[in-house]
């Protein structure tokens, strides 16, 4: 595999990059010539731990001494533009070599699972499980996606040209790339974010899910009939948590866009099908379906989903009866997709903060004259009161936020009526801290016009902080003991989705505690639900990097034992994770297949519980101690000032890559960690190449264990417990992507020098201890391909990292006359950095 990566990716990158550096771009003819020299200067300077400003000053003296300060900054911008496009080239090369790199030998692939379970008994067992299993990936518009649609199209064409070894087209596409803008001058609207992700639905997921379902059907036979095995969720246009730009009109428009997108996909599929179904009994029927879909895309009323499905079934029957079943498989392929995507494509989730709901409830009760009575009640009294109190108020008595919240809830009913129940059937309540939070949501549905408890919507509590995770089992038990919630759960077939947030959990409690806290919460919630005959569906809010629940996601799910409900896997796919893991049909098939098998392997295997009392006690001890180490870091008097003054945090909101503000409440008030969103928090550490949330505390605690003569216990935990092993392996990604020489200049800073040194020491300690525990010579020894990719990507962006750090330094010094240009330079470096690191935020 190492040889394949070297030949198919690394070697070809050097070849095509040499072409790219010599292409004639107007006004920047010297940039391609100077960039390799800058690269060498940065490598040499960082090895000597020189300050980025010193590295660039020396470079300019030796190679461009004649340039003014303004011209130097202009040249730095051009270097950044080149590096951005080198990253795109590398992305395209990896995508083109995807099958060769990943191959069919992957133990987590569907093909491997089918090969292993090939006797009749195992096949029946696997078929039964597949019929009751599900994977739901939810696309979110969190601001970590830097490639605009025009660039995604170039990457797709570039990948194909590389695959075809068409050097002429590659050269033309690289020239196009050199002239194509990479960033938005204005923040995208929520609707524009939706459009950008719908591109993936039409160009990737429609095909990858369709092909996977066909392959599974072929393996499992007619006994497989689970049309919901692979589901899609969608947050752009529905997620209003902290985003004041998402309203009812946005949600309705997004639902219409999703409907048009899936109808277009069906229409294109019919166009291809019509080339084969040229028979008298089928040709005109296909044409009629095409005309109806075209009319519906234009917004005209048309056939129902049931009518569309029945007509396709009739065409299939005509082929069976009159044409010996010729091309039946192609009609069945379309039918499977229609049953999977309906007229909605992806279910649109709505989300809002419980504190917003509470303020709306108080506003409504104030209009009814019962607010003071409500606020004086116990939780039990308040919950019953909310479903019994008369609603006697006029719409105009409510404030704007209340009216908007109720309108958003009403839109869910409209979307369900137009596109089907699954078009919008989940409402997520973030910052869930009590059972009353959920009762208030039920009250809001009542105020919006819903009647009773048999409402076709899943109400999904989201638990995020360490304290909320600990309280989650008690909150859910309180709800299940409450008759109205119990009735609603029964009406939803006994299924209760619960969302758990990795991002805010890590920000709040550190890497190990967040993951262990979620695992424990899942175990307790699973036990409570099983006692009542309910089935939990855990919905994981996972980001790209390990610090936000990312990393090797399939290994994480494969590591969960039978004490955690895993009848379905639901998770968010964010930003760069979409383009890196699901950016092409091949990649999406591979990663969706891994998610399918990850959950099934644990379910199909015999109960091999590795949580001995000793292992569990040790895991508890380690997570508790790393939590304390992380809390001590957050409580350091320089922590928040360091984030504000020494990192790129303050520039995150200016990148114009997401519609949502970077912190709750907005404004220029003093930094408060509670208001700061997890993405800019984790992303800022990543931009600095310090990656603190992904490892901090591990080095300290593992060193303590070694000093106490207990290292063998921790090593046994790594070897015996897949969950702990997956966590450490993911943390190794964070450590591999770190680069402390880049910011070594901070060690000399009078205020923050000792703080930075403490971070570096913990990085070195964590790396050393983890290597010792895992018996590895280098980080990620067990994943050489991933390590090779990371190293080459980090190598490509080294000059960009130095440029960004130098710009930060010059801005802090305040001596440059080009302050505005330097600020833009810092922001511009975000793009290449995130895209190269792929799961950096």
Image: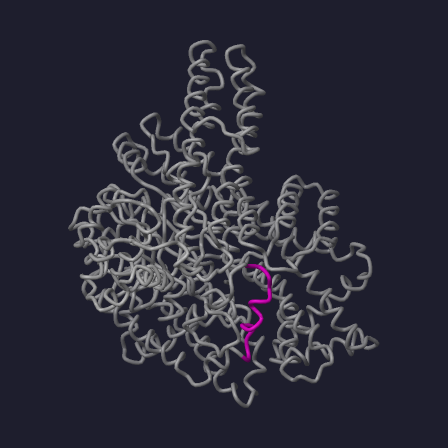
| Residue 43, placed above or below residue 334 | below
Residue at the (68%, 68%) spot, across then down: 39
Question: In the rendering, at what x and y percent does residue 369 appear?
Answer: 29, 62
* Residue positioned 78% across, 79% down in the render: 61
| Magenta segment boundaries in residue numbering | 645-658
Q: Report the coloring of the rendering.
A: one colour
650 within the magenta span:
yes
Residue 267 in percent (x, y) is at: 55, 29
**Which residue: 18% across, 64% down?**
613
Q: Which residue is more in the foreground, 546 or 819?
A: 819
Labels in figure, total: 0
Q: Position of residue 559 (x, y in %)?
A: 32, 54
Residue 167 lies left or right of residue 358; in this view the side is: right
| Residue 785 shows in the view | no
Q: In the picture provided, is 162 more to the left or to the right than 507?
A: right
Indicate the quadrant where residue 628 lies.
bottom left
Give the image location of residue 607, x and y in percent. Answer: 21, 49
User: In the figure, 230 relative to 507: above or below?
Assistant: above
Is residue 671 toward the left or the right of residue 488 in the image?
right
Residue in front for this viewpoint, 40 or 305: 305
Looking at the image, is 393 positioned above or below residue 646? above
Asked whether residue 750 is in view, the answer is yes
* Residue at the farthest right position: 66
Membership of 592 in magenta stretch: no
User: Who is closer to the viewer here, 791 or 838?
Assistant: 838
């Amino acid at each position: 595999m190492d040889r394949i990566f070297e030949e198919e990716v690394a070697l070809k990158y050097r070849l095509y990059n040499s072409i790219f550096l010599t292409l004639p771009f107007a006004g920047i003819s010297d940039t391609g010539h100077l960039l390799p020299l800058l690269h060498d200067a940065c490598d040499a300077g960082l090895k000597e731990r020189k300050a980025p400003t010193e590295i660039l000053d020396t470079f300019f003296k030796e190679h461009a001494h004649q340039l003014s300060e303004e011209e130097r900054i202009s040249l730095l911008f051009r270097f950044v533009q080149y590096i951005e496009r080198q990253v795109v080239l590398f992305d395209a090369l990896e995508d083109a070599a995807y099958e060769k790199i990943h191959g069919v030998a992957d133990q987590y692939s569907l093909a491997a699972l089918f090969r292993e379970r090939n006797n009749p008994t195992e096949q029946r067992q696997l078929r039964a499980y597949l019929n009751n299993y599900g994977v739901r990936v939810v696309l979110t518009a969190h601001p970590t996606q830097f490639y605009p649609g025009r660039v995604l199209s170039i990457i797709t064409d570039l990948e194909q040209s590389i695959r075809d070894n068409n050097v002429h087209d590659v050269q033309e596409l690289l020239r196009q790339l050199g002239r194509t803008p990479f960033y938005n001058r204005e923040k995208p609207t929520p609707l524009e974010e939706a459009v950008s992700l719908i591109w993936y639905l039409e160009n990737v997921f429609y095909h990858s899910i369709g092909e996977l379902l066909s392959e599974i059907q072929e393996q499992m036979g007619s006994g497989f009939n689970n049309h919901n095995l692979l589901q899609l969720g969608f947050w752009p246009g529905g997620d209003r948590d902290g985003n004041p730009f998402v309203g009812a009109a946005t949600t309705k428009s997004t639902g219409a866009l999703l409907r048009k997108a899936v109808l277009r996909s069906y229409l294109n599929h019919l166009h291809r099908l019509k080339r084969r179904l040229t028979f008298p009994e089928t040709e005109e029927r296909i044409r009629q379906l095409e005309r109806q879909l075209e009319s519906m895309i234009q917004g005209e009323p048309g056939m129902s989903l049931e009518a569309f499905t029945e007509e396709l079934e009739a065409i299939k029957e005509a082929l069976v009866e009159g044409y010996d079943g010729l091309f039946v498989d192609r009609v069945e392929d379309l039918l499977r997709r229609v049953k999977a995507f309906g007229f909605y494509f992806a279910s649109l989730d709505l989300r809002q903060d419980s504190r917003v709901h509470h303020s709306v409830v108080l506003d409504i009760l104030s209009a009814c004259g019962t607010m003071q009575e409500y606020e004086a009640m116990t939780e039990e009294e308040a919950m019953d009161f909310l479903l019994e109190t008369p609603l006697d108020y006029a719409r105009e008595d409510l404030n704007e936020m209340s009216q908007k919240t109720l309108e958003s809830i009403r839109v869910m009913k409209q979307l369900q009526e137009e596109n089907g129940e699954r078009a919008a059937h989940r409402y997520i309540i973030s910052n869930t801290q009590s059972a009353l939070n959920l009762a208030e949501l039920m009250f809001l549905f009542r105020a919006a016009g819903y009647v009773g408890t048999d409402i076709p919507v899943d109400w999904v509590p989201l638990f995020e902080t360490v304290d909320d995770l600990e309280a989650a089992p008690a909150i859910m038990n309180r709800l299940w003991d409450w008759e109205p919630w119990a009735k609603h759960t029964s009406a939803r077939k006994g299924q209760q989705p619960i969302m758990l947030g990795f991002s805010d959990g890590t920000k709040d409690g550190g890497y190990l505690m967040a993951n262990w806290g979620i695992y424990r919460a899942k175990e307790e919630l699973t036990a409570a639900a099983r006692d009542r005959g309910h089935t939990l569906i855990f919905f994981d809010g996972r980001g790209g990097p390990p610090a936000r629940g990312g990393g090797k996601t399939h290994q994480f799910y494969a590591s969960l034992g039978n004490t955690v409900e895993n009848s379905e896997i639901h998770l968010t796919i964010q930003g760069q994770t979409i383009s890196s893991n699901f950016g092409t049909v091949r990649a999406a098939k591979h990663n969706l297949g891994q998610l399918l098998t990850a959950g099934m392997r644990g379910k199909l295997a015999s109960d091999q519980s590795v949580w001995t009392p000793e292992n569990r006690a040790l895991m508890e001890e380690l997570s508790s101690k790393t939590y304390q180490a992380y809390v001590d870091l957050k409580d350091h008097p320089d922590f928040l000032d360091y984030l504000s003054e020494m990192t790129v945090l303050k520039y995150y909101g200016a990148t114009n890559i997401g519609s949502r503000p970077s912190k709750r409440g907005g404004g220029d008030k003093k930094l408060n960690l509670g208001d700061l969103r997890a993405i800019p928090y984790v992303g800022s550490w990543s931009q600095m190449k310090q990656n603190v949330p992904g490892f901090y505390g591990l080095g300290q605690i593992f060193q303590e264990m070694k000093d106490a003569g207990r290292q063998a216990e921790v090593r046994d935990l790594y070897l015996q417990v897949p969950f702990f092993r997956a966590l450490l392996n993911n943390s190794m990604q964070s450590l591999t992507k770190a680069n402390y020489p880049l910011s070594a200049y901070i060690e000399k800073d009078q205020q923050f020098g000792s703080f930075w040194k403490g971070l570096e020491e913990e990085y070195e300690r964590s790396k050393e201890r983890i290597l010792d525990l895992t018996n590895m010579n280098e980080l990620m020894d067990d994943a050489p391909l991933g390590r090779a990719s990371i190293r080459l990507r980090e190598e490509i962006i080294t000059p960009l990292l130095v440029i960004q750090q130098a710009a930060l330094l010059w801005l802090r010094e305040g001596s440059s006359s080009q302050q505005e240009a330097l600020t833009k330079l810092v922001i511009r470096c975000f793009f290449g950095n995130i895209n190269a690191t792929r799961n950096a935020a």
